Image: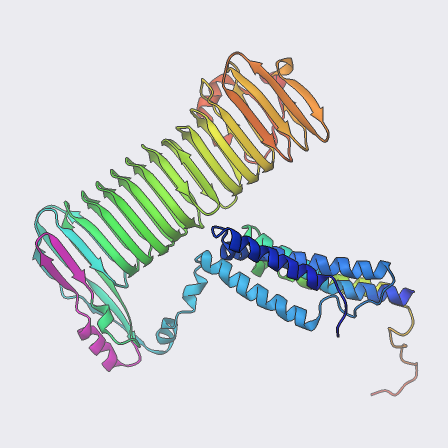
Amino acid sequence: MRRSSFTGPVVLIAIGVVLLIHSLSPEFRIGDLLSNYWPYVLIGWGVLEFLEVCFRFFTNRPLPPNGVSGLGWFGVVVICLVGFSAFQIRQASPWVRWAGFERGIRAFGEEREFSVSPIQQAVGKSPRLIIENFRGDAKIAGTEGEEMTVGGHKVISAFDQGELARANDETPVTVAVQGNTVVLRCNQGKARSRVHLSTNLDISVPKGASVEVTGTTGDFDISGLSGSVDISSENSGIRLQDINGAVKIDTRRSDLIRCNGVKGTVDLRGHGTDIELTKIAGQVTISGSYTGSLALRDLAKAVRVENSRTEFNVQGVPGEIRIDRGSVNMQNVLGPTRLTTRVNDVSLSNFTDGLELSVDKGDVELNPGRLPLGRMIVHARSGNIELAIPQTAAFAMNAITDRGEVSNDFGDVLKTSSEGRGARLSGTVGIGPEVRLATERGTITIRKASGSATTTVGADVGSGGKYRPVESRR
Amino acid sequence: MNNRRALFVQAIRGPLLLITLGILFAIHQAGGLAIYRSWPLLIIVVGVMKLIERTSAPSSGVYPPPPAPGGPIR
């Protein structure tokens, strides 16, 4: 049935506009945009159809029997499937792994464990250990001496016993030493493709060693090395402990990256889930897309994080930074801090040297705690801003909300004026840095932090609960 | 005229369902309630729409007349 509608033309125009923007500015990434925002296409489509039906109803035109036709629903299903899988793949969610064919073999075939024949090899004081292309877990520990030992076991699944034994023979673990370089191979590529095989290695190396891993799937547990660690992996959980050199980790998928006690720089990139960094003496750089929680503790040098939804820079983290789904918490960090985040409640306490913060959607709670105040520039598109200022601080306040109210503990020193549906608060206390707060929608609360508590009380000031000034406290 | 209202409610069902679906997916992607938990809402929306459809339908001709008393007993 052909009916003259305006939904078709509008959709056409929208597609044209998107493609035009794409061709005019190549950095405009259509795939990213669509994989993140495709549900809004559905909503937009629904709204258009809805408006059309309303329009027809009120202008007394014939109504279609269905708002969305059968073909339309087919399109919806296609959009859902494509958009949802695009989004999930970008999120590197584990369900992609479930679809692997190995499960078939695991379910129907046989599985057996074989032990790896132990290797003992002199490799010098500080060898460079290279591990190539293998699937399985590896535990690498630094030891005294100049010898490297390798042990462990293989888990092989195949359809019958003969295939199992052959697969075991075809895939010996070998170590090749060439000067300072030690290459460890598991030769898994030599096995037939119908065999599923994972090699779990227990390796000890002289503690001066550095480790380089490429193209693997499996977990790593590396500890006590004074060299560097460089891991480039398809899918790994990684745990590092007491590494003196630089750490570089590039994962396509990962459930957890945990580094504890690294003296060198730490550089994480790629995709993954959770990150935990503790006691890092060098610079920390995290860039890519990590969808889980991020926990940073006790980092001596500058930290730069460019994650898909949150970006920030700080100059050091004597305290803690935690980013979970829906919240960003920073406590005791060295500024200047720059933070940009999309949909998150932000709580910062005990930070130095200024702040530049931009939030799309979420409440902001700031408790600088230390004097003198740094320059603070905060912008929220939608969310409340609450700032606790030490009583003796000097600052030049300029707070604006486009829609909402302003409340203020400092009394007449700061002037409140209402503007349209919003309000403004401005004024200076002493000679101090600029404090500029802006929200497009939300309340702004300026309160006096009670002197002694501010330096120690951290993010616990309140998660969510609205602050009500209590006069009797003073 | 009443009939036209019923038609309107029926026509509006698809678009509303589409909007709900879009919102559920958007919530899923924003990190809120996952779609595999929130999908029953779709059924609820369909049910509510059906209810509204019934109440706005013309009172005759939609429901079959109740069976006459004294009919054949099977």
Dividing the picture into quadrants, the one containing residue A189 is bottom left
Q: Position of residue A327 (x, y in %)?
A: 51, 41
- The structure residue drawn at horizontal position 58% and vertical position 59%, both measured from the top left corner, is B35
Residue farthest along the top direction in this orientation: A430
**Residue at the spot 40% in from the left edge and 49% down from the top edge:** A288
Residue A80 seen in render? yes
A257 horizontally vs A45: left or right:
left
Q: Which quarter shows the N terminus of chain A?
A: bottom right
Residue A181 painted magenta: yes
- Point out residue A325 in the picture as x, y percentages from the top left corner: 50, 46
**Above/below status of B68 relative to A141:** below
The foreground one among A199 and A368 is: A368
In this rendering, does residue B44 appear at all? no
- Residue most extreme to the front: A24
Please identify the quarter of the rendering in which residue B23 is found.
Answer: bottom right
The colour scheme is rainbow
User: Foreground: B28 or B7?
Assistant: B7
Q: Position of residue A97 (x, y in %)?
A: 41, 65
Residue that appears at 15% across and 51% down: A128
- Range drawn in magenta: A158-186
- Expressed as whole percent of the image width and height from the top left, the position of residue A474 reads 57, 15
Residue A23 or A152: which is nearer the viewer?
Answer: A23
Question: A333 or B14, which is in the foreground?
Answer: B14
